[in-house]
Structures are given as C-alpha cells and as structure tokens.
Image: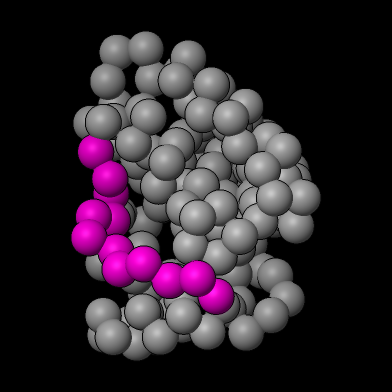
Amino acid sequence: MRRAGWERRLSAAVRDWEDRPFAWGTADCLGFCRAVARSMTWEDPIPGLPDYGSEYGAAKVLVSLGFDSIEALVDAHLARLPVAGARRGDWVMTACEGAMPGAMGVVTGRYAQHMGRNGLVRRPVLTAEAAWRID
C-alpha cells in the first residue's frame, strides 16, 4: 500500500537514480523500479530476488525461478492494468534491444523513467506495452 507522503518519496527516489549509470544487478531497470516502489510502500513488490551481475545472470535467475521473461516475473507479483490507466508510481514495460526484451520503468506523469546507459531516460507512457499497479 502506498504510504502517506509517497509522492514526495517517489520524486526523491527518481532524483537519486537520475545520473546513475546502468549496471546489471545493482542499477538496472528492475532494480530501479523495485527501489522506487520500496520508497513509496516500504515493501519490495518482488522480494527475495537472487543476485546477478550480467544480462546472462539475470536471464539465468529468471529461468531458475520458473519464468521466461521479466514480464512473467512481474505478472506473478503485481496486478496488470491498461497502459492508459497507469498513474504516477506504477510500472510499465517498453520494448528495447537486447536479449532481455522489455525495459521496465516507473510512471512519473505522461512519461515513464527507464534506466539508460548513463542514467534515466524518459519515454512516453502511452508507448509502453504493459503496465502494473503499485498500490
């Protein structure tokens, strides 16, 4: 559940990640989303995720947990909603290049923040392929 003052904590968490360079397992898209959600709700929506340090390691973790994609992992923990219904703090997935299709991001208004190579990048929410509610 979103705690009182979640809006302020959402903004602060996004600012904390603005210039953080991408790093698998410590500063990647799912790590960013989980950190923002923890700041808003005081709980990790995907607890107990094993450590990994590469794209291959992330894919290996997904398989070891019985999932074939990040989307399936998130589906197992969060309620999906229509992309047009996503509000500030919710998560979205947008297509990206690489072996792990789909970059997770956090909605901050009309745009969602996603981890880029050198920090956060903004993408229009309505270009997302999927969305999940963070309560």
Q: Main secondary structure of the magenta part?
A: loop
Q: Taking 85 as reference, is 124 left or right?
A: right
5, above or below 86, in the image: above
Q: Taking 83 as reference, is 65 left or right?
A: left
Q: Nearer the viewer, residue 50 or 40?
A: 50
x, y (%) of residue 28? 56, 57
63, above or below 75, in the image: below
Q: Residue at x 70, y 50 (%)?
A: 21
Q: Residue at x 29, y 64 (%)?
A: 49
Q: Nearer the viewer, residue 45 or 84?
A: 45
x, y (%) of residue 2? 29, 27
Q: In the picture, which quadrant includes the N terminus?
A: top left
Segment tinted magenta in the rendering? 43-54
Q: In the picture, which quadrant includes the C terminus?
A: top left
x, y (%) of residue 93? 56, 60
x, y (%) of residue 80? 36, 56
The mark tally for this picture is 0
Q: Quadrant of residue 74?
A: bottom left
Q: Is residue 13 magenta?
A: no
Q: Residue at x 75, y 57 (%)?
A: 117
Q: Quadrant of residue 37?
A: top left
Asked if residue 32 can be seen in this view, the reply is yes
Q: Residue at x 61, y 37 (%)?
A: 17
Q: Taking 135 as reference, is 71 left or right?
A: right
Q: Nearer the viewer, residue 68 or 24?
A: 24
